[in-house]
Image (cartoon, rainbow, N blue to C red):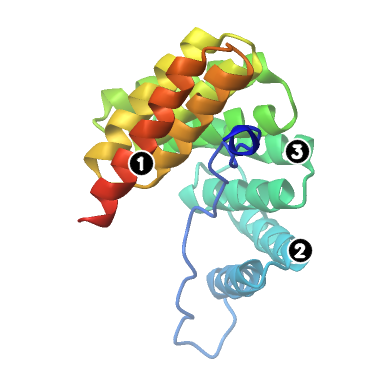
Amino acid sequence: FFHYCANREEEMSDEHLDIKPIDSLQSSSLTEEAEIIKFQNIAFSYYHKNNFDKSLEYFLKALGVQEFYYKNQVNKTTADLLHNIGVNYSKLKYYYDSLDYYLKALNLRKELYQNQDHSELAQSLRYVGAAYYRAHIFTEARDYFDQALKMRQNINASKEDLAESFNDLGVVYEKLGDYNQSIYNYEEAIKFYEEINSNKAVVIMRNIAVMYFSIKHDYEKSIEYFNKILDLKEKIMSI
């Protein structure tokens, strides 16, 4: 039990690419659009092989072509490319470069959606928060995670997205030492994950149990959460 309590699982969801590879155009001439598609698809191929240096190289090439032909245009493809470059920088652990590109994507999406609530805007807010979190700037991370959650609530986002946002806040409040707020947000995340029968609820319960044991020294609550984990595992396995 004591050894088990000493270990926490990865606490925050990883960032992911925002768009899927695009089918090549049925054309022998390499137009600007086809060139962008070619570079994107090469980038995706390298990304899925975990070769983030090469993936980044080709996303940057795609962005260069995109900005050359569509300069000063508010363009969804440009925003998506900026986002994906940010993801690759994050994978390479260049968190300030990642933050720079996530912020560029966020600002462009604000223009694109005219500051109206939108799922892609909420996602950008979350990823900016994630970059601040990974750079250990926790107050900024909290503020962006909070904005992302509120926007997701406003647009009636999926239960999985809401659970993700509550978990993000639980993680960052724990880093800030506000353990009551952390537990509150973790428990809200658990509610949504349980509704969709996700085993991520088990991970969060384990982290709450560790917090009660190691930080709050409330051993009865810690045991209570470990018992909840066993019950939830049985429930998920029976589905």
Q: What residue is rendered at 49% in x and 80% in y?
A: 24
Which residue position is annotated with label 2?
57
Q: Nearer the viewer, residue 21 or 145?
A: 145
Mark number, residue 95: 3
What's the CA distance linking mark 3 and mark 1?
Answer: 37 Å
Q: What residue is rendered at 58% in x and 12% in y?
A: 217
Badge 2 marks a residue whose secondary structure is helix
32 up-or-down from 117: above or below: below
Amino acid type, callout 2: Glu
User: Can see residue 53?
Assistant: yes
Where does the image place residue 73, in percent across and percent down from the top left?
54, 44
Badge 1 marks a residue whose secondary structure is helix
Q: What residue is rendered at 37% in x and 20% in y?
A: 150
Q: How many numbered circles are shown?
A: 3
Where does the image place residue 42, in percent across and percent down from the top left?
64, 74
Mark number, residue 230: 1
